[in-house]
Amino acid sequence: MSDLGTLYYINVVAMVVIGLYIVLTKRNVLKILIGLDILGTGVNLLIVVIGYIEGGTAPIYTAGISPAKFVDPLPQALVLTAIVIDAAVLAMAISIAIRLYKEFGTLDVRKMRLLKW
Amino acid sequence: MVTIVPSLIIASLLGGAFVMTAVAPFIRRITKYVPSIVLLFNVLISLGLLLKSTNEPVVEFIGGWEPPYGINLVAGPMGSFLALIISLIAFLISLSFLKYEPTIEEVKFMILFMLSVLGASGLVLTGDIFNLFVFLELMTISAYALVAYGRGGEGAEAGFKYLLAGSVAANFYLISVILIYASLGSLNMADLVTRMTMLKHGVALASMLFLVIGFATESELFPLHGWAPDVYTGAPPSIAALVSGVLVSASLYVLARFFYTVFAELNTLRSEMFAMLMLLGVLTVLFGETVALVQRDYRRMLGYSSIGAAGIILIGLISEILYAFIGALLLIVAHGFAKVPLFMMSKHLEEKYGTRDMEKVKGAFKANPKLAIPLVAGSLTILGMPPFLGFWGKLLLIYGLALKYPIIALIILLASIVEAAYYLRMLHRLVIQDGELKKQIKIDTVELVTYYAFLALLIILGILPMLLSPYLAGAFIELSNPSFYIKVAMGVMGG
């Protein structure tokens, strides 16, 4: 494992932990959603990192490059799907946030207590 | 000769949703028929798949890519049985849409409903763990929006909570998938079974934990159930029934699938996962049934009862005992069917009296025997009374568990007594007790048809449970016998 690779993995763990922390502790709907996005981006970064090879290249133009130098293309296909799904979740979340603001006149989750937590 | 393939289920729902989007601005009136037609078609397709599943199960390679490279849809006994139940519940719920003269909002509601059912059907049919993530997100994202349709602030609040819990859980599951892929280089369940032995114990344990946390959240297991009571209270009644009967059952299936198939060769890991899931199951039963006892809100009570049921079903599914497993599958059917009329009743309460507080609507159904019958029958099903299907479910489950884990069987028996206490109290308040409420509740014919269709199915299956038994036994063979599943999924067996 190269230093650069390790750095990425540390980054992944940090982003997931930070994202979870924000989701669990913040009280503003939009801040919670930012936390959710950081968590999702951390997971997406993990997907990219596992397919990465030090000094590797994308398996598109293949002449004169040994197959061992190709990065794994499947995680890149997976991450595209995951990014699209993340975007959809966030779009949905923000539209629900708009409804919340219309109904409650605030974005503070402590004041949304029609239902018991 | 037309061959039946599982992707028809997915394609028809997707196609129906597209057609509805396209024609809604022009001829909105016909859109209300689309969900029922498509879902009836799906009921027939999945019935066909189920009939074939014990002899020559259908497996389909998407795009012609053979496993382990491509995505495959596997209609084994387990998958096609659950697909049939999901389609059937969704079809009968969609009948109640026929009363709409749909506004554009209601058209959107129906489209989202179909997409959510599509996700659930895909979840139980797919043989690829990343594809499973995609279907999971499809199912839950549509469900967030559907829950937010609930009236006023309650719906939006419940939808937001569901979204938070659901998307964190989905991300956890994705981490689990990636850990497995990074070590083994495959995403196909059947292919993973044999490769799993190469996985280091630490990595396997981590991916198992992420999986269990993710799907325990989706299937409302204690202590990760936080979203569930609010969703059951805030969502539109039909969606509360969909979440309780379909979405949660599909998530429980995923836990069972990983436990039985994907992790089949890892003995240490399996015993750890078994202990964890059993503990979660028992805690969920105890928690759900106890908290339901103190609820005054009709729908919240049903919600906690659903949580308890999820625990009972989980225990049966992973017990590795034939009878308990069959009992759990029957309970998925009985609970899913019975909760639909039960949740829909709250709509009548809210529309007529503007409250769900059981103390304030004493005797509400006394003057409305047409509604009281499905209410009583649904409750008796959940309690496991003959002649309803729930009786066989509970009987087999407790009998099976008593053979090997008498203490857990005893706990479930006690929980059933508690369940009986609060359901009978609810029936006493709403149906028997005299109140000032003598008003007739106006009912739509299509809604009555929905309630009585569920009732008829519960009684027919309760009298003739042997209709299902070859497929339930087949499902047990498929799960307890990974080599059978591998043969099916790789297309060695049948079509």
Image (cartoon, coloured by chain):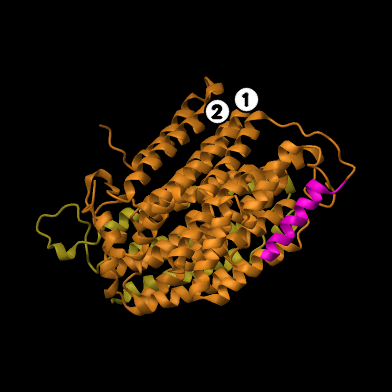
Chain colours: A yellow, B orange
Instruction: Specify whether B353 is left or right of B436.
Output: left
Residue B239 visible in the current orientation? yes
Indicate the secondary structure of the residue bearing disc 2.
helix
Q: Residues within 10 Å of mark 2 (few under 14, many from 20)?
A: many
| Mark seen at residue B32 | 2
Q: Which residues are magenta?
A: B417-434
The reply to whether discs 1 and 2 touch (Cβ–Cβ < 8 Å) is yes
Question: Who's the residue at 21% across and 54% down the image?
Answer: B492
Position of B159 with respect to B68 (left or right) is right
Numbered label attached to residue B200: none
Residue type at the position of mark 1: Glu
- Looking at this view, name the residue that lies furthest to the right: B436
Quarter holding residue B473: bottom left
Disc sitting over residue B101 in the figure? 1
Q: Position of residue A35 (x, y in %)?
A: 55, 61
First along the sequence among labels 1 and 2: 2
- Quarter holding the N terminus of chain B is top left
Q: Name the foreground residue: B100 vs B23.
A: B100
Q: Main secondary structure of the magenta part?
A: helix
Q: Position of residue B267 (x, y in %)?
A: 35, 77
Q: Chain of mark 2?
A: B
